[in-house]
Image (spheres, grey):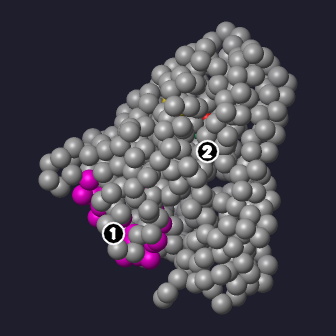
Amino acid sequence: MNRSDPKKFRIKSFGCQMNVYDGERMSEMLVDQGMSSAGDGEDADLVVLNTCHIREKAAEKVYSDIGRLRDKDGNSPMIAVAGCVAQAEGKEISRRAPSVDIVVGPQAYHRLPGLIDRAKTGKKALDTDMPAASKFDVLPTRKKQARPTAFLTVQEGCDKFCTYCVVPYTRGAEISRPWSDLVNEAKALVDGGVKEITLLGQNVNAWTSEDDKGQMQGLDGLIRALDHIDGLERIRYTTSHPNDMTEALIAAHGEISALMPYLHLPVQSGSDRILKAMNRSHTTESYLGILSRMRKVRPDIAISGDFIVGFPGETDADFEETLAIVREANYAQAYSFKYSPRPGTPAATMEDQIAPDVMDERLQRLQSLLNEQQHDFNRTALGRQTDILLERNGKLDGQLVGKTPWLQSVHIIAPELAIGDMVDVTIESAGPNSLQGKVTRREAA
Ligand code: 5AD
Ligand code: SF4
């Protein structure tokens, strides 16, 4: 069956922020090709599912989403599966879901236009190559942005091979994008109205490249260069690995005011025995050492983390050590997950897989401690004056939602203000998940 030329597309990104970034780049590329993005409630004749493979639940979701795209007569729009499920499952996807037309991996999505052309002739199109030439060299330059915040992928892939994780297989080996490409992309984003950039990478703090003078630079050097871009008010980065946390990057937090006081530093477990089995290559002691050095240069820093409960062999005593490191680290915010065995990873075939009810109980205890810490952290903001960058409309009339430097959401009622404004507020109330504030001063226009 020949398919018509798709004119309207919709991209749905799941999983991590790197997928969000990839989704935005795909969208800009399709617009460049003459297509347009389907509005809310509008039908799309191309749907791109930009998928996540990190846990089983995320990976399985794509199949129910594909089913939902069928109309009452059994017809579907052109469907492309992109992202990490595409990379990991390849051809298997269209075997399991015959309505899928295109399967495209995270390193090949710049070739989507050619794949669409093939799909138009009724053939299945598959591209899960990891080509040597980078997609970044052919994607169109960044244009006017709809939001005041943007992601910028600086590093991709992972060489760490934690024993539970699919990322080294789906995203490939660690690569750092070149210095000048990143400085230029950041400038283009700021020209497009962006005030805050979050630098992204699976191991963002492993980023390294020569600068324009031939000097090797680490992430701290890149941040210093971006700090010189007029109009760029806030810089963030995520996700960092404890082993790549250099002293220079820690020091940068005490020196660069645009670098926000927030560090997402996954520890995964508080048991050194489990960290070893996970092949994390750091210890609880080295992790806590980083936090204390960071807090010396930036005492107000908000610490965030990731945790896995129920890794194979995790005993009650190991889990108690996880609770202990949480108490010691004192998180502003954190993500926690039940271990999910992933095909092809070493941990999936380890003995002593943990029973689901044990995992449930551990996750609940961990999350209740983390929620308590998050609420406590939010309460320390009460009465404080801070700037917030307004990012979206709230649910109420005249309500806007902005972020503090510590990445907390603040709701304000201010019909005279707009998304993209940076304003000073006083925090008046603090819930477990967000704050409320009153505007005290608006930035000079
Ligand atoms: N099971 C559960 N959680 C996982 N993560 C990565 N792989 C798995 C897995 N197999 C979590 C880690 C990582 C975050 C992005 O997802 O905590 O930091
Ligand atoms: Fe996965 Fe570990 Fe690499 Fe993070 S550092 S992406 S958890 S393998």
Viewer-side residue, 179 vs 26 = 179
The answer to whether mark 1 and mark 2 are in CB contact below 8 A is no
For label 1, the SS is loop
Q: Which callout, 1 or 2, points at the residue further toward the start of the chain?
A: 1
- Picture layout, residue 150 above or below residue 154: below
Q: Residue at x 26, y 50 (%)?
A: 178
Segment colored magenta: 179-199
Residue 296 in percent (x, y) is at 50, 44
Q: Position of residue 208 (x, y in %)?
A: 30, 43
202 left or right, relative to 142: right
Relative side of 152 to 318, left or right: left
Q: Which residue is mark 2?
A: 304
- Quadrant of the rendered image holding ligand 1: top right
Task: Classify mark 2: residues with Cα within 10 Å, few (<14), some (14-19) or many (20+).
Answer: some
> Can you give x and y, in whole percent of width and height, for residue 330 in the image?
67, 40
Which residue in the protein does label 1 denote?
A: 229
Q: Kindly report the secondary structure that dominates the magenta region of the rendered protein.
A: helix
